[in-house]
Image (cartoon, helix red, strand yellow):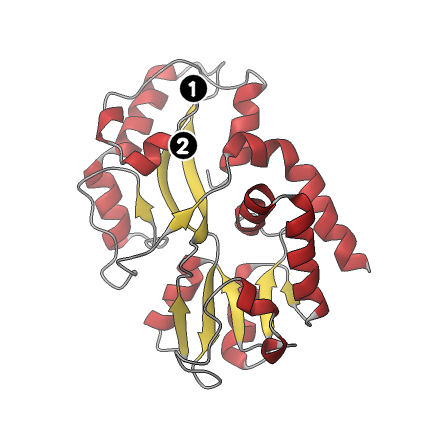
């Protein structure tokens, strides 16, 4: 599932199988291993940028486009920036959660308030953001990685920037329901998802193929940035604060 904070909360509530380790756990990347909770209730199957910076090349070039998250609030980008609504779009929550944890609530609220005062366009979901970007309604965006690379692969006039400070990640995880009658089959399926051959096939042939694999020995898409840096909010923290953060964004939409 593409919602590690929510899955983490299910584990804390005793709804997931605990203290089980897949046989191929040792083959996971260091980044993936860092996301595994102490009680072993879930295992990462991959991670992708919940948002990267994407700009319309008809409006900007590499020298004039926004390069950092702070740049999106600059006066020269007034009324031309868009993003998905964290209160609606599932991948948008991990994006904002990283700001709230890494910068603190007050600083994060100040940052997103500055974006809104700068004329931020907020759309229900990432495909809406992508359509607005290619249609000229906005000229730059915080956009989910898969949407961004798909646009570029389709020949749309866009380019992608991975901010040096990193792109907040959405980590996909696999978990097993504690009371399932099919534990053996579920365990086998989790191990299948963590298998390098499976992850390579998902990258080579899958629809959601732009992601950082959790298994070692897997090659990401060739057109994905080699220096792609992912940062991630701690799952437990993000899960505990999800309701209040989403409510804050919902409240801003009403204002």
CB under 8 Å between discs 2 and 1? no
Q: Secondary structure at mark 1?
A: loop
Q: Give the x, y percent position of residue 30.
A: 29, 35
Q: CA distance from mark 2 to mark 1?
A: 9 Å
At x 38% / y 45%, what residue is drawn? 47
Q: What residue is disc 1 on?
A: 38
Q: Is residue 181 above or below residue 107?
A: above
- 212 or 226, nearer to the observer: 226
Rendered image quadrant of residue 138: bottom right
At x 43% / y 82%, what residue is drawn? 57
The answer, for residue 124, to whether it is visible in the render is: yes
At x 65% / y 50%, what residue is drawn? 107
Which image quarter holds the C terminus?
bottom right
Q: What residue is disc 2 on?
A: 35
Q: Residues within 10 Å of mark 2 (few under 14, many from 20)?
A: some
Q: Is residue 10 above or below residue 104?
A: above
Q: Secondary structure at mark 2?
A: loop
Q: Give the x, y percent position of residue 248.
A: 73, 48
């Amino acid at each position: 599932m593409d919602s590690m904070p929510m899955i983490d909360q299910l584990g804390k509530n005793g709804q997931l199988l605990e203290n089980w380790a897949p046989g191929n756990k040792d083959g996971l990347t260091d980044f993936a291993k860092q996301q595994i909770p102490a009680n072993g209730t879930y295992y990462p199957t991959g991670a992708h940028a919940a948002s990267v910076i994407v700009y319309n090349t008809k409006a900007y070039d590499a020298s004039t486009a926004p390069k950092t998250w702070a740049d999106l609030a600059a006066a020269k980008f007034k009324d031309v920036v868009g993003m998905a609504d964290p209160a609606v779009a599932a991948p948008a929550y991990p994006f904002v959660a990283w700001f709230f944890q890494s910068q603190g609530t007050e600083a994060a609220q100040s940052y997103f308030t500055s974006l809104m005062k700068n004329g931020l366009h907020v759309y229900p979901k990432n495909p809406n953001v992508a359509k607005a970007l290619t249609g000229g309604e906005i000229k730059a965006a915080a956009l989910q990685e898969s949407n961004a690379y798909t646009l570029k692969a389709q020949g749309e006039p866009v380019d992608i920037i991975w901010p040096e400070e990193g792109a907040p990640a959405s980590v996909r995880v696999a978990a097993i329901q504690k009371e399932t009658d099919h534990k053996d089959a579920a365990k086998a399926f989790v191990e299948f998802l963590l298998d390098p051959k499976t992850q390579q096939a998902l990258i080579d042939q899958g629809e959601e193929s732009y992601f950082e694999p959790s298994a070692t020995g897997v090659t990401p898409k060739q057109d994905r940035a080699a220096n792609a840096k992912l940062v991630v909010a701690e799952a437990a923290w993000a899960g505990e604060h999800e309701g209040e953060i989403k409510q804050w964004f919902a409240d801003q939409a009403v204002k």
